[in-house]
Amino acid sequence: MVSLQLHRLAFLACLMVFLTALPVTAIAGGQDAELGFFPYTVSLRNRGRHNCEGIIIDQSSILTAAHCIVGLTANRLSIVAGAVKLDSGGTRYQVSAIHAHPGYNSWALTNDIAVLKLASPISYNPYIRPIALATQDPPAKSGALGSGWGVSRSDGPISNTLQWISLQSLDHNVCKEQSGVTVSQICTTSANKGGMCRADSGGPLTDERITLVGVYSWTRGCGDGNPDVYASVAYHREWIRSYMG
């Protein structure tokens, strides 16, 4: 178990050094993830079907995007952890409570963040682990990683295998000019016009230290070179922590 965990950490460290040179496109057209390399990423299911991503932040708490759970009740939702395939593997956990950010704006998609509580605690193993919350936003032009089962084009199918993509943090003022974001949001871009897309909502953005800096919210188009927008974890950190444990 220890050797596998060290192998995973070594892989991620090397990945963050070299991945900006890799020719990946959108998430679903990018690189297949290996089991255990993104142990904090979970599939959020609505009546058993993949709906969005979620992120393990402790044994009873999952972070996701608020727009993923609008109009839904907890009894319809579950998560599958420890899997890279949507159609096999992993462990299912039932959601028992939903806490959307009280400032969530469905039109502007600001404060697009929610905490889900689970009916039973997650059992950690090398393939299922939490991720630490960032205390500050990533600096402009720093490397980042996204992972999810999203599509590679707006009208395409979701991926059955978890994908990852290399991204770069975008200067906040530049993103504000391009996408009208607020201080509660952060943005990324990709040199190859790749990025997040539909069904990646609620997915994680991690920095070079493999801490959680963002929760994927929206973009214009899909793999069109437009910035990807995330709810800032550092900005919402205290609200998130109020529902942990």
Image: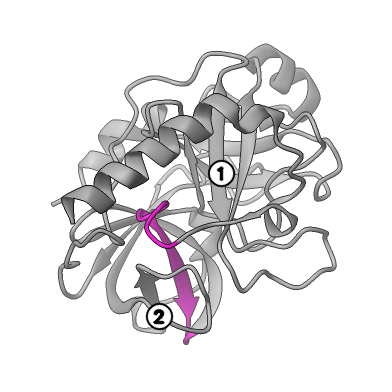
Q: Which mark is residue 56?
A: none
Disc 1: which residue = 146
Residue 171, position in %: x, y?
65, 15
Residue 45 is a magenta residue: yes
Residue 165, position in %: x, y?
63, 44
Residue 161, position in %: x, y?
59, 68
Residue 194, position in %: x, y?
76, 42
SS for tag 1?
strand
User: Type of residue at label 2?
Assistant: Gly
Tell me if 111 is positioned left or right of 217 in this view: left
User: Type of residue at label 1?
Assistant: Gly
Residue range highlighted in magenta: 35-48
Disc 2: which residue = 89
Tell me if 37 is positioned left or right of 107 in this view: left
**Front-most of residues 168 and 244:** 168
Q: Earlier in the sequence, mark 1 or mark 2?
A: 2
